[in-house]
Amino acid sequence: MLEAVRSNKRISQIILAVIIVPFAFFGMDAFFDGSMNRASVASVGGLDIGPREFEQALRERQEQIQQARGGQYDRALFESEAFRMSVLESLINQKTLALHAAKNRMVISQQQLQELIASLPVFQENGQFSLDRYERLVRAQNMTPAVFEAQLAQDLRIQQITAAVGESAIGGTLPARRLLLAQLEEREFRELQFKAAPLKEGVTLAENAVRDYYEAHPARFERPARLRAEYLVFDQKSMHARVEVSDDQVQQFYQANQDRYGQPEERRARHILVQAAADAADDVIEEARRKAQEILDRVRSDPARFEEIARAESQDPGSAASGGDLGFFGPGAMVQAFEDAVYALSPGQVSDLVRTDFGFHIIELTEIRPPTIRPLDEVREEIVEELKRQEASRLFAMNAEKFANAVYEQPDSLQPAAEMLGLEIRTSDWIFRNGGKIDGYGDEKLIGALFSEEVREAGENTEAVEVERGVLVAARVAEYEAARVLPFEEVQPAIEEQLRSEEAARLARERGERTLEALASGQGTEGGWTEKRKVQRSVPTLPPAAMQAIFSASTANLPARVGVVMPQGDYVIYEILNVERPELTDDDPRLQAVAQQYSQWMADSELRAYISALRERYKVKVSASALRTESQ
């Protein structure tokens, strides 16, 4: 979707439903090319995806996930190769579709763009399109309207492709009916259980079984090298507590930032626009000026007709229908020339002709809304926290190098760095090389340094490692244990328990299979069956293994029986007594819902296949290094 739009939540919430492209992520089937231009992350048909574009997409996806999770941050996910791959795949898919649209000369007319933009509520005020609001929001994204519209046109061309492919997928009602019938099918059953746990008491292991197992599987009882670490965490939080804020500082900040604690003066105006592009020919501009002057003369001869004349003459499609009304706006909302004219007027006064890049404006100021400022007492805590945050950030930046130098220049202890910056030396629990974490940070560089021979044997500090933006950690090995095979005596009870459980499960399975064979030959079984129950395929109330067994069993002849080994070692016979299949009418709303879902699934499948074919045609290449973070 359009990158600039997506970065503005107010815009994206509206436009998302209009121009979203349902890209499907699939496995990395691109050809990894180690000889690619280093400035390129990937290429599609010779068109590059650069590092800046890729990093921007990564940040946007991270923001989306954080918003969905209530602001939670999963650093491990964001740095994983799988996450980076999914983002890169999405970019490749978009680039592939955009290239295909360009090669097939797909065009979005200027009129189509204008109609779409004018219809979006985010660009409207009082239900009408506002040209000035549109320009303000677009420029807030560091874009010009021309760039915005070019990117929007590309997204619309991509949407044309995806919509066409999706509409070509024919789901049909018969598959949907079969799918729904299968989901609603109910099977009545009862079960006969053969528990493994009670059989463990009767299990007798061979004299040397435990020792033999230990000696035959030494790798299973090897504990990897592990260590405890002493460490320091230096971050902005460590500076925050020592910051003091005076009343004078609060007062000065409040006075210097009044606009942050209230609503500035807003003005309401209406205008009449006679369009004339900035780069239009001189004769076109002169004709527009002449027409605008004629309209201005009519307005000044009868100011009460401003609204009526605006409806008839204004060429602003967003405000003409509302008599040129632009609603209330504050400083910075309009282009400079327009704003200067508005703030020079008094209520009821009409401006001279005002020239902007859009043409000639006739402006009437209709109302002024005075500024409102929240009192200092109401925002004092907010200001104190802001000042503390700023000072803590400054102190962190100022002392980060000192921290790094201290742990490096005095490598035999963390104490000097701790005393210098008022930090607490902490001690970790036992950590392993794989999956180890220090204070919750599993940074590969930090953990790898701790387990390196240089740091471990020399007893020195690691360097200060940035484990997260604005968080530095330095550590040293406090205690180390090399990898070793655990002694037999230490693992003997666990091996005995395992072997007894395995033997009990084998006995339970044998008893169950014998009973199943007896039932198949017409013999009965004494008691043990549970009460009859029903289960529906779409409502799994049994373990997955049981659901799979019950619904995959043939029901041509009832009762039907099937045996299942459960994960905990029990063996269960399920006896299917009856099958109930619902009757579905053609107007059943459930059938219509499933048909829609099935059609969507078919459309998604068609789109995945279509994009896959295009990727092969346009020769996608990916730099393998793009999927690795700096710490990998």
Image (tube, rainbow, N blue to C red):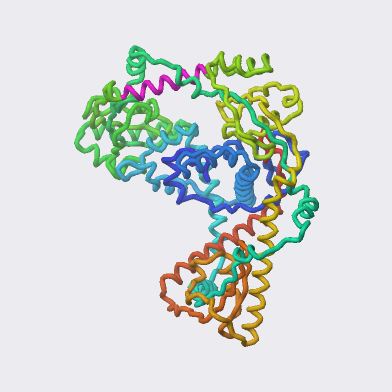
Residue that appears at 64% across and 49% down: 96
Nearer the observer, 412 or 295: 412
Quarter of image, res 446? top right
Determine whether 105 is above or below 286 in the image: below
> Given the current orientation, which residue lies at the most extreme bottom position?
522
Left or right: 40 with respect to 591? right
- Residue 291, horizontal then vertical, whole percent: 34, 35
- What residue range appears in magenta? 379-395
Quarter of image, res 354? top left
> Given the current orientation, which residue lies at the most extreme top position?
248
Is 499 covered by the magenta stretch?
Answer: no
Left or right: 396 with respect to 365? right
Instruction: Give the quarter of the figure containing the C terminus.
Output: top right
Residue that appears at 64% across and 84% down: 520
- Residue 443, horizontal then vertical, whole percent: 63, 33
Nearer the observer, 527 or 372: 527
Counting every numbered tag in the picture gives 0
Nearer the observer, 56 or 291: 56
- Residue 498, horizontal then vertical, whole percent: 68, 56
Residue that appears at 55% across and 46% down: 154
Nearer the observer, 340 or 198: 198
Give the prevailing secondary structure in the magenta stretch.
Answer: helix
Quarter of image, res 450? top right
- Residue 596, horizontal then vertical, whole percent: 48, 66
For the question of whether residue 295 can be seen, the reply is no
For the question of whether residue 15 can be seen, the reply is yes
Left or right: 316 with respect to 629? left
